[in-house]
Image: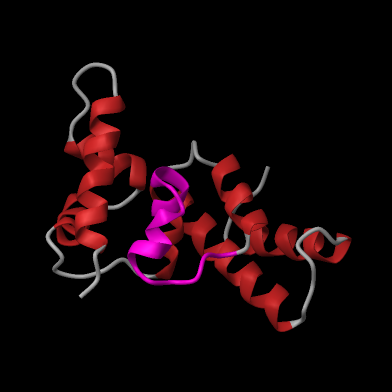
Amino acid sequence: MSNFPAWFNRAYKRWSRSQAGEEDFIAFCDLLGYPPSKVLGWMHGEFLPEKPEVLSIAGILGVEVYQALDLPKPDTELIKIFESFAHLTGQDRSNLALALLEVERILKKDNISTKSPEAKEIIKNTFEKYGLRK
């Protein structure tokens, strides 16, 4: 059994204590970009987040989520890119996670460094594909 629910509940409590004022569960769900029913399911261990959701959670709560789910961490450069878009919420956040996972798959398949000019072009094209433009 995954220790994700316990980790996720602790992460939520840490987040909640760090917020000024009366932040609530709905604000947490909005921040993650997922509906309360899904977030509650994760908290109660009814189901586990899928790969794009894991990246989204990592961007808010930390890459430790990968360890809690016994998953390999994505490339650190992709995590940095995701974190630089932390202001996104909802569908844009979900699209960002999907785009970065696609970029990661392409770069691994073709053995391309994340720091190469070719990778920058792949990132740009993939972001556009998912509606993420400047």
Q: Position of residue 68 (x, y in %)?
A: 33, 63
Q: Position of residue 78 (x, y in %)?
A: 63, 57
Q: Say which quadrant the N terminus sits in.
A: bottom left
Colour pattern of the rendering: secondary structure
119 or 44: nearer the eye?
Answer: 44
Given the current orientation, which residue lies at the most extreme top position? 21
Q: Say which quadrant the C terminus sits in.
A: top right
Judge left or right: residue 123 versus residue 10: right
129 or 117: nearer the eye?
Answer: 117
Q: Position of residue 94 (x, y in %)?
A: 44, 56
Does 127 sit above or below residue 18? below
- Location of residue 120 (image quadrant): bottom right
75 or 35: nearer the eye?
Answer: 75
Given the current orientation, which residue lies at the most extreme bottom position? 109
Q: Say if residue 28 shows up in the picture.
A: yes
Q: Position of residue 40 (x, y in %)?
A: 15, 55
Q: Going 35% across and 40% down the picture, which residue do you hit?
A: 31
Marks counted in the figure total 0
Q: Going 62% across and 76% down the picture, which residue do you hit?
A: 105
In magenta segment, residue 77: no
Given the current orientation, which residue lies at the most extreme right position? 117
In magenta segment, residue 64: yes
Q: Going 75% across and 62% down the picture, which residue do you hit?
A: 114
Q: Say if residue 53 shows up in the picture.
A: no
- Location of residue 121 (image quadrant): bottom right
Boundaries of the magenta span: 57-74
Judge left or right: residue 102 versus residue 134: left
Judge left or right: residue 121 versus residue 75: right
Q: Going 63% across and 49% down the picture, which residue do you hit?
A: 81
